[in-house]
Image (cartoon, rainbow, N blue to C red):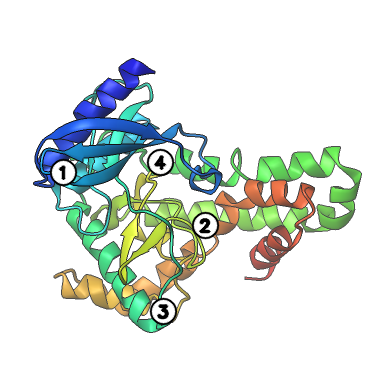
Amino acid sequence: MDNDIQLLTEEANELSHILNRGNIVSAQVQKMEPYEQGFSGASLLRLKVLFADGQQVSFIGKKADLKERMVMRTLTEQGHHHTPAAYCENLTSDEAQWMVEEDLGKQLSAPSNRLQWLNKVAAALAEIHGNNMNRGKEMAWLTPADAEYWNKIVGQLSVDHFEKAISDDYRFAQQFEGYLPKVKEKAALFAKNMIEISQEEEWLTLTHGDLQNVEGNHVYNIQGNPYIIDFGFSSYAPFYIDLVDYFSADEAILYHKALIERGFSLELKDFEERFKAASLYPCFIYMFPSMMDWKRGNEEKLVKLIDKIVHD
């Protein structure tokens, strides 16, 4: 652990220089609260540091895979306007390595003015996506959203679990077995549509992939401005997957407007068609977690999710 602290302190010092905060003179590990640990299973800690001028600041240490470390380096180099700045010494190992990020503090609810907030989130996403649009050759470390990827999303990560639970759990089967044919049909159609959309290379970009909705944990409200965290599920994919859980179809037009303002040309009709085709994305990536909630007695999420798949 001492070696980890030394490495994290060195990385925090490098990040401090990026942030123009000077040199660190001491550092101390602080325990993180259970609610801060998240669900990814990544090792996390808080590093409280003292600068030569007497200022104290905390950083977050996170053990992240190469993909996430490279994503955070890229976003930091691009100005980290809507993401925490980050630094990692090791950008070659495929194994999880310690990375240091700015500590954004406690998650706050989104501001009460929903439209104003969604405008800001749309602009933030348009900036992140726009800066990385059609740069796949430079981002070989990102998971490509190819046919294998989409078939995995609707199979191994979701419907396979659903089908197995029907086979193994009598109570689960009683409630959900009747939906299985339609779920499999919709899964196949979703994968087909997303494979087609992913052929449009000009609209592929660095995506978060797990943005969640407005009540989720990955878009922070920092003094009224959105900051996006936890890029562990990121991929090189159509930008629509970052919109379909956070925005309704009508609200997503805010993003289209922000993208156009950044100089991109995309017909609204085409945007709306692809948004609709991608709209089941959160249903498949959150199917298994919702099944775990169901087993713990919270059935509402899974019921809503299956209903959306079947009737959307």
Could you tell me which residue is drawn at 77 percent across and 48 percent down?
Answer: 296
Q: Which mark is residue 310?
A: none
Res. 281 mark: 2
**Amino acid type, residue under disc 4 in the picture:** Gly
- Select label 3 or label 1 by which is in front: 1
Query: Do the CB atoms of the residues marked 4 and 3 lie less than 8 Å apart?
Result: no
Secondary structure category for the residue under label 2: helix
Q: Is residue 190 left or right of residue 12?
A: right
Looking at the rendered image, the disc whose residue lies closer to the viewer, 4 or 3, is 4
Which element type, helix, strand or loop, lies under badge 4?
A: loop
Q: Amino acid at mark 1?
A: Gly
Specify the amino acid type for callout 3.
Glu
Q: Are the residues at dot 3 and dot 2 in contact (C-beta closer than 8 Å)?
A: no
Residue type at numbered disc 2: Tyr
**Category of crowding for the residue at label 3, using alpha-carbon neighbours closer than 10 angstroms: few (below 14), some (14–19), many (at least 20):** some
Residue identifier under label 3: 251
Q: Position of residue 12 (x, y in %)?
A: 22, 34
User: What is the distance, in whole Å, between disc 2 and disc 4 at their CAs?
Assistant: 17 Å
At mark 3, the secondary structure is loop
Residue 97, horizontal then vertical, whole percent: 34, 25
Label 3, label 2: how many angstroms apart (C-alpha)? 17 Å
Marked residue nearer the N-terminal end (4 or 3):
4
Closer to the N terminus: mark 1 or mark 2? 1
Quadrant for the N terminus in the image: top left
